[in-house]
Amino acid sequence: MDAVPEQAAGAAADAAEAAPGTQLNLDLYPGGCRRLLHLCAQQPLPLLRVEFLRLSTHEDPGLLEATLAQVPWSLLHLRSLVLKGGQNRGPLGACLQGTLTTLPAGLSGLAHLAHLDLSFNRLETLPACVLQLHSLAALLLSHNHLSELPEALGSLPALTFLTATHNCLRRLPTALGASSTLQCLDLSENLLDAVPPEIGGLSSLCELNLASNQLRNLPASLAGLRSLRLLVLHSNLLTSLPVGLARLPLLMHLDLRDNQLRDLPPELLDAPFVRLQGNPLSKESPDGRTPPAAPQDPEMPRLFLTSDLDSFSVTPRGCSVTLASGVRLHFPAGAITAPLTIHYRLWLPEPGLVSLGPHDFLLSRVLELWPHSLAFQQDVSLWLRFVPPCARRCREVVVRTRSDGTWSDLETHVEEEAPEVVRMASRELRALLGEPEAAVSPLLCLSRSGPPEFLQPVTVQLPLPPGVSGFSVDRSRLHLLYRAPPTASWDDITAQVALELTHLYARFQVTHFSWYWLWYTTKTCVEGLARKAWARLRLHHVNLIALQRRRDPEQVLLQCLPRNKVDATLRRLLERYRGPEPSDTVEMFEGEKFFAAFERGIDVDADRPDCVDGRICFVFYSHLKNVKEVYVSTTLDREAQAVRGQVSFYRDSVPVDVPPEAEAARQKKSADALWIATLPIKLPRLQGAGGHWQGAGLSLMPLNLGDAETGFLTQSNLLSVAGRLGPDWPTVALHLGMPYRVLQRIRHEFRDDLDGQIRHMLFSWAEGHAGQPGAVELLVKALEQSDRQDVAEEVRAVLELGRHKYQDSIRRTGLAPEDPAGAPALQPSQPAQA
């Protein structure tokens, strides 16, 4: 379920409450707008009594606008209006946004409207008519494109519930703190980097959710929220918290997971309602040491229960239990002190049992374990299997436990098992089979972790082949194929499964995890065809290329691409890149992992998630570009001569010692050859003394921009910034205070060389501001004003790292005396290299 507070959901439900017979739901079927226009033209008497209206926004924008313009004149007593998109889903199951971009001004005449849901639409600004709805109590704006909220929002006299999750909010209106009625505020999944101090004036606020933003600190005024019960701050960049939070009298839940907290007040560190996972600081024992983990018994019993059992026994030795539904429980040794029989039951999601919010989805059945309220001596782990209805972020999935009629959240971790999906082009398949209407679904490989025993069939959903609809499909031409490695045969299991067809998908139950493929063909014997398609799909003839930028040879482009695309790709790239000829043709399988490594004095100079031990990792798929750009450097003296090296492509892993006969190894053609290809790389000689490089009229002077208090940026840091600015560099330059005529001169001097323009601008500005106080902060502010918050955050991270290194070096050398508080008093000195 989405982590939506229950009280917030209850507030929305109360605001939307309507008596029976006064609800009009026109969002379930197409044509709802036309039906409402028809009713408005007829003006039947029951229409005047409607208090609850749901209307889909997946309609023609003009028709939708005309329909909404009639609402204030025909539905005089309307209390709840739901104009929510998301009913339609894309090919991957994700909710599609509606077409709503604004609201007609006439909606301000809905004097009784208390509940307005505009979620899953395309709003970029809040319509002005919303600010004139003086009876509005609940406003839902999630999943839109809002970049800011108006100041007048805080003056709505009846507003108690506001959610604007999954938007692009960068700041909050200060007047929002003037609302005396607001009780629930959810602003998670936005781009907020600060919270105005005025938010401390929300005297009635009970629940505040600021998760998944970019907050680095919080105002001290949050300690004035005396009614606050729930505060969610996970997945931010917080390094500290206001001290007063520990003294909030009603606070029952504080979520601080996945931040950068290193210190907390003792009251919060020991509080049972605080969640701290994913921080440098975690909950510790009173003596400052993490308590040791419980010893694991290697002979712990493992139980696999069938569907006719409803209980199991646990002893002090512990055990691992797998239920027939796929639920797993792990009782560590010492969890109980005496043998115990535990009963369980799976409940259907009855409305009275589970309360779901407006955007919640129940992803599993409800599991009841008893005896209730049993206290374990060790943490008991529980695994639940679910199939999300669409692509979801892990932190939006919660597991709740019920006690005394109320639900509370448990600490959860999501283990994602992404299935392997291989696609085959329809044109290639039709050429192979000689059948113009043949089509296949993506080839799906299902695997699972955990015990190998299979307890119960699993439902699988495959998209229908392209051009095939579930409402018009000829079932006699539909074949479901199954392959169990290591055998090479494909079995037609269509007659052994019950295929349930929807408009876009085919659902069926399987008892084995393996390869599954859905075919649509007139051929009666499909096994041989699938074997031919499989052989074609799994083996490709590809080339590898390594090109260097003409204006910046240290930037290297690596690409793996099919043989028939090499010439066209080189013609497109050689205006900006130069490099060796492509490698000889090599054979590569769909989904195969391979690596690129630089050798003979050249290293990767980049902090990349796919770069491990100097190796750049690729995964080959024929429909992907398989291209990566990296910065390379060398530890050798480039002032004396140019540095020659190579980039080698390997299967599996790079050997420890690179043999000199790499060229001979490249000639090996077997599929399991370690070496795939080796291509030369050359870094030109540096001209001039002192490390200057006179490439393209640019002098990269050794410099340190900044001071000891704010941190320093080095030449390497500025190069990294320059590599990320792209076409936004003129906006950044203007915010840095550079005259427009200077920008025009740079454009003229470096015609057709975007990288040269960026570097010249940035380094000429840096050389003019070296040694000046506040220069680094000016650069960060210019990046933020230019909507390049991503680069600004990277610069701040570099500064923070540099400050830590500098302070640590000062402490280690003993140059800084300790201040009375115990922290060393740092004196300005030479900067540490960030």
Image (cartoon, helix red, strand yellow):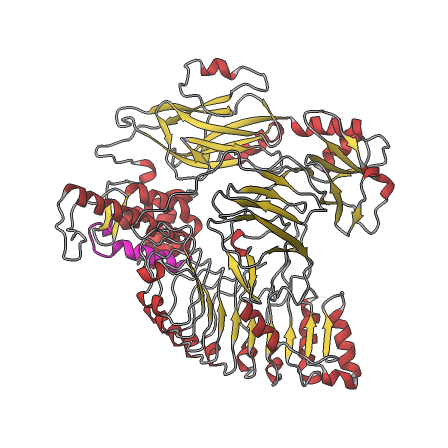
Query: Where does the image place residue 670, in percent across and percent down from the top left?
Result: 59, 16
Counting labels gives: 0
The answer to whether residue 655 is above or below residue 503 is above
**Nearer to us in this view, 534 or 686:** 534
Residue 265 visible? The answer is no
Locate the N terminus and report the quarter of the image it occupies: bottom right
**Nearer to us in this view, 4 or 597:** 4
Query: Where does the image place residue 104, in percent across and percent down from the top left?
Result: 62, 77
Residue 673: quadrant of the picture: top right
Locate the C terminus and report the quarter of the image it occupies: top left
Question: What's the residue at 48%, 65% (across, down)?
Answer: 187
Question: What's the residue at 41%, 18% (across, down)?
Answer: 658
- 279 relative position to 778: left or right: right
**Nearer to us in this view, 657 or 449:** 449
The answer to whether residue 68 is above or below residue 336 is below
Is residue 776 highlighted in magenta?
yes
- 354 relative position to 755: left or right: right
Residue 350 visible? The answer is yes
Q: Main secondary structure of the magenta part?
A: helix
User: Bounds of the magenta span?
Assistant: 767-788
Is residue 780 highlighted in magenta?
yes
State the residue lying farthest toward the front. 338
**Nearer to us in this view, 408 or 630:** 408
- 741 relative position to 702: left or right: right
Query: Where does the image place residue 169, in percent across and percent down from the top left?
Result: 47, 64
Query: Where does the image place residue 648, in percent across and percent down from the top left?
Result: 46, 24
